[in-house]
Amino acid sequence: MSFASYLSAVQGSDRQQESDWRLLLRLLPYVKAHRRSLVWPMFLLIPLALANALQPVLVGQAISLIRQEPVLWFLENQTLRSGLNLVVTLLLLTVAVRLTLDGLQSYLVQKVGQRITASIRDDLFEHVTSLAVRFFDRTPVGKLITRLTSDVDALGDVFSTGAIGIVSDIVSILVLLVTMFVMQWQLALMLVMLLLPVTWLIIYFQQQYRKANYKAREKLSELNAALQENVSGIDVVQLFRRESFNAELFRNTNQSYVSSVDKTIFHDSAVSSTLEWVSLVAIAGVLGLGGLLAMRDAMTFGVLASFILFAQRLFDPLRQFADKFTAIQAGFTAIERIQDLLNEPIEIQDPEQVNRHQLPQSTTVPGEIRFKHVWFGYKPDEYVLHDLDFTIQPGEKVALVGPTGAGKSSIIRLLCRLYDVSKGEILLDGVNIRDLPQSELRRRMAVILQDGFLFAGDIKSNITLGEDYSLAEVQQAAKNTNVAQLIEQLPQGYDTSLRERGTNLSGGQKQLLAFARAAIRNPGILILDEATANLDVGTEALIQDALDKLLVNRTAIVIAHRLSTIRNVDRILVLKQGRLVEQGSHDELLAKSGLYASLYRLQMLET
């Protein structure tokens, strides 16, 4: 079961009302998946705790041996020299056990923690990439990156240093308490009485830390979002001389983040300082009560020395417990934030059952597209498309024309099912696209956008996009779209490395690669969204020749602001404010002297 489905199954009515343990229980699927790897780290807790508890006992026995006080059974009838040699040997053995097993356990635990973290990050990435485009419209990229990196890392600390570490500290405390009660119950009871209020204080401060940490991570998300926005828009920042202004905005956001972090530091420091003072009080209590008992011969000085060390060691795991509890509280914050993201519903989903007989027979055959009384709005009841009803016949070339904001790109997004229609339905060869698997729908069509996105990698991988095409097929697609010559002129040809977003290529070169990317898939439906807008005259002539070949025996939808480029299409659909107001061929629409004729004549005057 994935993290997303498990969270959905067990989510409560209110995040604030959920206990910390319930949040931890939500991670059980990952713990169970790696339970075999946790066997050894858990098993090693016992010898580590015993070695830790035995060291104060051995030191105390050495003092009792020197003072000729009663000693434990293994030192009875031993001379001073032989007894001290035995104690030293056992001490060295416990030290060796702790040094060896502590490092091994730490390695094994952190290894498991990293595997669990990787699994969570994989599930989170898979969920995020499955969300509808509508979600990304309202969510800054920087906030998503924070949740995928910083929050998941904090969650990983719950496993690698937190949860198992806390179990280790609890086992150590329990073993120490049992040992103390066996040796001297009065001093042990006094230390337990000190533990109770300290534990309450730790829990209180950690709860305050968690609240502050949640706010700090929200501020970190804002900081990363601001950073991402400025880096992405660096051209505008520099061209309009906004460096100082944006730096001041970033400084304010950064200061707000620092203030939030200061609060987390305060609560974390409060725990540490409290434990320091209480540990000193515990030692003073042991000296006071223990000294009184020793003076009355109710306890040996060796046992007193052991309890002074016990007082220190009892608060060491408690101090470590507090530090790890801080990591767990940060992990709880991360769980809450990741839960918010994983609880985001996947709006666009495949049908549960697919009728294979209804599916189009081939992805390379031209398809019929039918918009049947389609309404759509990016926000509820704010429609940008109104009752669109038209049919595009198989093999027909159709252009979408209209002023900015008329809804042309929205039609493309609905057809590709990046969004779902609000009312009505879209049919592909008579089948509602909601009844088609998304992979099947998108194999049927290729979309070439105005700004072709390129990934970091090489030319070949940006054409194949991870699909299994041979180099010969890539070269043939490039040749068919007149891109081959340009690619072969690059330093390493098809193996030329591209930087992020293809910044080492010109806008025209990136667009040409987008045409090759579409051609290699040989789709039955081709969609061009201002695909030639970034091309110069020479490059456009090359691509127009390629388009003439590419459009043969395909259904095509073309969006173009330059109306001169769509004269030869079979039909033109004219949109205005989300409504279909005219349709017909270029000559028919000019003869009507309507909106299309007005737009066309206006562009002719501009040229």
Image: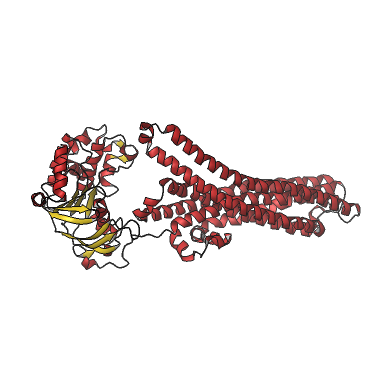
Left or right, 312 with reference to 503: right
Q: Position of residue 242 (x, y in %)?
A: 41, 33
Left or right, 489 with reference to 135: left
In-front residue for pair 416/71: 416
Is residue 600 positioned above or below 18 on the image?
above
Quarter containing the N terminus: bottom left
Can residue 591 be seen from the camera position used here?
Answer: yes
Identified at 71% across, 48% down, the residue is 274
Q: Where is residue 109 in the image (x, y as percent from the top left)?
A: 55, 51
Numbered circles on residues, count: 0
Q: Where is residue 91 in the image (x, y as percent from the top left)?
A: 73, 47
Left or right, 190 with reference to 331: right
Q: Position of residue 588 (x, y in %)?
A: 8, 52
Left or right, 89 with reference to 112: right
Quarter containing the C terminus: top left
In the figure, residue 261 lies in which quadrant? top right
Can residue 108 be seen from the camera position used here?
Answer: no
Identified at 50% across, 37% down, the residue is 251
In-front residue for pair 78/70: 70
